[in-house]
């Protein structure tokens, strides 16, 4: 299947939106990827999962946020998800995207 060009931003409000159109906004960091429809869908699912992590109903109606151990565990889980996102962006990314990700040290240079 042929790959298409898409743009991904990691804005927490619209993290799971992958657009075929580049947003011309100097404040926004977009990552350009080349993906098949299936790869795009998989990335959207991953982005949605990471984005919704902090909005889990259980975290909203309990006092879990007062437990430092639970907070650290939640933070670590979120960071693991974000690391997975950057790995996938790197895998699908154009040369420019791969360079951006390397510059912010979100990927292992040995790959």
Image (tube, rainbow, N blue to C red):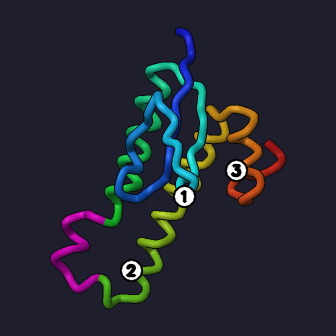
Distance of label 3 from label 2 (alpha carbons): 29 Å
Q: Which residue is mark 2?
A: 70
Mark positioned earlier in the residue sequence (3 or 2) = 2
Residue 61: in magenta span: yes
* Image quadrant in which you'd find residue 106: bottom right
Residue visible at 50% across and 48% down? Answer: 9
Which dot marks residue 27? 1
Range covered by the magenta-colored residues: 55-64
Q: Nearer the viewer, mark 3 or mark 2?
A: 3
Disc 1 to disc 3, C-alpha distance: 17 Å
| Residue 12 picture quarter | bottom left
State whether residue 36 is above or below residue 96.
above
Locate residue 77, reporting x and y percent. 47, 64
> Residue 20 in the image: x percent, y percent?
46, 28
Residue 64: x, y in percent? 28, 82
The dominant secondary structure in magenta is helix
């Amino acid at each position: 299947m042929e790959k298409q060009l898409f743009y991904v931003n990691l804005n927490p409000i619209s993290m799971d939106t992958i657009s075929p159109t580049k947003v011309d906004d100097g404040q926004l960091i977009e990552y350009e990827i080349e993906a098949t429809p299936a790869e795009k869908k998989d990335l959207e699912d991953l982005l949605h999962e990471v984005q919704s992590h902090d909005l889990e109903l259980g975290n909203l109606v309990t006092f879990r946020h007062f437990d430092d151990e639970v907070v650290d565990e939640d933070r670590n889980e979120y960071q693991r998800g974000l690391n997975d996102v950057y790995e996938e962006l790197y895998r699908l990314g154009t040369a420019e995207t791969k360079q951006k990700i390397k510059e912010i040290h979100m990927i292992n240079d040995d790959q």
